[in-house]
Amino acid sequence: MTISLNDVKKVAKLASLRITEQEAHRYVENLQGILELAKQLKTVDIESIQPITHCIDLPQHLRVDQVTESNQRDRLQQLTEYVQSGLYCVPLVIESR
Amino acid sequence: MLNHAIDKVPGSAQIVGWQPVIGLEVHVQLLTKSKLFSGSATAYGADPNTQVCPIDLGFPGVLPVLNAEAIHMAVKFGLSIKANIPSYSVFSRKNYFYPDLPKGYQISQYEHPIVGPGQLDIITENGECKSVRITRAHLEEDAGKSLHEKLDNMSYIDLNRAGGPLLEIVTEPDLTSAKEAITYLQTLHTLVRYLKICDGNLQEGSFRCDANVSVRRKDQRQLGTRVEIKNLNSFRFIEKAIHYEIDRQIQILEDGGSISQETRLYDADKQKTRFLRSKEDAEDYRYFVDPDLCCVTLSNEYIDNIQKTLPELPHQKNQRFREDYGLSSYDASLLTNHPELADYFECIVEQKIPAKLAANWVMGELSASLNKAGFGIDQSPVPAARLATLLQRIADNTISNNIAKGIFEILWTTQKTVDEIIQAKVLQQVTDETAIIQLIDGVFAENPQQLTAYRKGKDKLYDFFFGQVMKASGGKVNPQQLNRLLKEKLNSNESL
Amino acid sequence: MRSASLHDYTLHELSIALKNKKVSSKELTSYFLARINSYDPDLNSFITITAEHAYRQAEMADAQHKKGTAGPLTGIPIAHKDIFCTNYIKTSCASKMLDNFIAPYDASLVNALNQAGAVLLGKTNMDEFAMGSSNETSFYGPSKNPWDLTRVPGGSSGGSSAAVAARLVPAATATDTGGSIRQPAAFCNLTGLKPTYGRVSRYGLIAFASSLDQAGPITQTAEDAALLMNVMAGFDEKDSSSVNEPVPDYTRSLNDSIQGLSIGLPKEYFSSDLDPHVAAILETAIKQYERLGARVKTVSLPNCHLAIPLYYIIASAECSSNLARYDGIRYGYRCSNPLNLCDLYERTRAEGFGEEVKRRLLMGTYVLSAGYYDAYYLRAQKIRSLIMQEFKEAFQQVDILLGPTTPTTAFKLGEKIRDPISMYLSDIYTSAINLAGLPALSIPAGFIDGLPFGMQLISPPFTEGKLLNVAHRYQQVTDWHKKLPKGF
């Protein structure tokens, strides 16, 4: 499988990363290199194998339903200057979800 | 030319020969105290960003831990719709960028949802029972809220809701009309409130609906292209939106056009759906199993325990009300639509009050007063036991229904007992026949012309006499007795 | 106390000295801070030095020693890799993206070490977002190898390694996703342990690849690592991937006899391609073990050559999702004057992230995207279970696996940075272990042309005690680990 310049540009968009034309060319080369390595994976017979989601048998880990956090707004909002009246500010969102 | 028909009353387009096909997705906000993956509070209406912690904000290094109660509630729901509860369920990440999604992905469920296929039975317009198939229900975290200020060219984000627990319930495209869709939604709405997993407050956003609408010719097997409609936050809007959309699609198809797969928004002001984005622009969410979370494995014992503790479900209560109390289908439905109302009603009936009397009062005077004051039933100044004492006095003929209404108003605003009020105002019904006859005689004496006119054939004057006796007694005469005695006296040829 | 300088002492020896009141924590703190001041400009192993904080902690530690309530780590100076969130202290992950980030909470591991009385001297340099094998992708410039300042200390935990190697601090914490503790430990003549996945809490460890990341110690000796592991290991309810396995006293089993220990040599690690110097070092080590009573056996890990592509597919997929939160909205770098929302996201991320990070974000997004998910990511997760199975089968035949940690000694600065693939291939012996979630460590085993070379020991899940024991016994009969780089 080869990765094209267009693939890289599409993927950059998906990853919300602005890349220049020059960078795109460079990344195509890099990613192609990794995919070359990945070719070996195709030779493996995976017919009857289940994908694993965790490398250890993770036991059930649940939390009791109780409120353990208090209002930390002042403290946490010190980490950005882009707040107003307790709200985070971003450029106008045009498209609704 | 196209828009003509659609701008008319919704549902007016010619749908003969066309079959609407509707599937619904409802996001139910679960009533847990804390969020799905963090210990932040979930209460509605807090100041912006005061119910968020580093986990909700997607700070570097934080990790999610699953809320046990959310699982419990999801399983309760699954069992109430007779769904398969798989013993193994996983969380996956749905990746996309949006300012109200702090981590840049939503923790949701893709493969292996917590609730498998089930069904919800609804009563259609013609009184028939229809099983609506539910494809699945899964848990996912909520996103925050944004306020868009065009004037500033800014959007403002409140993440209080981010990380809140949602149960997304998806139906198969089994619904065939807007009305049916609403019936399904109302049935589901009642169910989640019965299960106490959701407060069903549409205005506050705890019960959100998206509709998938398509149409096909009646003889067509294949489904038509479906359109998703979002931003539906009241049952009224949902019905209108679906109607509009069905009409819109039929118009296009009848004119030889085709439907594009797209997402539309319902515009409540214009009462139309409008284009939001096409499905081709749809995001690639790159789902993969979330490595930060364990798989959810549920033992048979766990599931059985929840099954045992399921409350009486709405359709079960409805049936019981009809069978045990002889209530009409209409009355039973109205009462059982609200679990608190049903409980209130039963509390009264347990005091040996006739069911029909109790039902009338709960659906009538009580509900009207609650609505007027903007109270929920739990805020009623007249609890069930107290109303029962009032209804007891109607049942034993101490007072008439009309008088009781007046007493109810006093109960609403004071702490007096029913008997105290009756004594104080000497409100006992006049049931003594002699007394009633005396009152009738009195009225006849004062209105000789009307009496003559009646005897000459003016039957309508009966109401006049009835009213006059009632008035003379200060409303205390027992109406049934008055009716009988008045008729006797009027129709006798006695002359005074 | 022997009359050598304080920096010649292992953590264990310092602990005894503190206990016996031969030295105070305040003295140790100022001693090591002075060393950092002198030597770090050449090494660039620290991003942030927390002198004030350290003195406050040292004072409390000394008070505890006075009261007699001190533990083995009370008053011991350490450093944290700048990937662990430290409350009120800058936590940058060596990225422009977090250059202005003051963490609002402590990682669970940081909290545990604070509770144990350790004194934090500073946050160490690393590859940006832990992506790299040379510490050259750091926003704050590369760290240097104290053994040869023209060479890399390894990565991504290059700073922790360089700092301990130059004895600017007796020990440091680090993380390992594909070899990031073991490889720098090998390049710098140190003991680096990557515990079993789930052994040490990941809460507060800035995530790179969630199913592979694990925190561990970089120390001078296995004994020191045991002391740190006693505090670092343990169940954490804030981390759903944390395992509730009891923590033994790792120091107790250090001196256990290894008579009859069965050591497996994966034949794929000992192929004829192996550098003859490396082969010689390993042969000597193996003989050492045989003299200690161990038996050696050849085993096979037939699919281990697939580890690199598997690792890069899985790690980049997970990181592409883990790094989606960096958008400048709630914290971190934010581009100036964004034209619109799209510009905010795209430019913040383009300007905030370095090239290697971007490369992996693109790779990860690609392998998860529609049309490629099955071919790459899903396939990788399936083959991963094959790798796990192979190790399981090997451990049915032997107790421990032994092999080289890296194919070469430390390479020169700038040598591989322009060729990402060659950089990735240096993880050839280490990345399979992360895929399988196994514990492994690297210990000094010799020198090639004056540069340290490390050997890797791998054991079954939750047998860190055995691993440290096997390493300790070796360190009792060799002195590679005692050698210090010249000029420090």
Image (tube, rainbow, N blue to C red):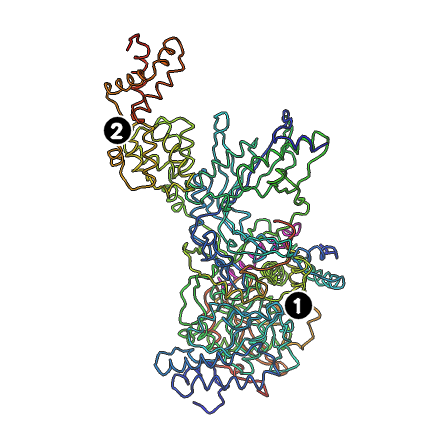
Magenta segment range?
A: C368-397
- Cα distance, mark 2 to mark 1? 89 Å
Q: Amino acid at mark 2?
A: Gln
Give left or right: position of A21 versus C341.
right
Q: Amino acid at mark 1?
A: Gly
> Between tags 2 and 1, which lies in front?
2
Q: Is residue C302 visible?
A: no
Residue B215 numbered mark, or none: none
Q: Where in the figure is residue C470, as x and y percent of width and height?
A: 47, 73
Name the element at disc 1: loop
Q: Main secondary structure of the magenta part?
A: helix
Q: For residue C425, which quarter of the picture?
A: bottom right
Using the image, determine if residue B325 lies above or below residue C397: above
Q: According to the image, label 1 marks what residue?
A: C354
Q: According to the image, label 2 marks what residue?
A: B428
Provide the chain ID for the residue under circle 2: B
Provide the chain ID for the residue under circle 1: C
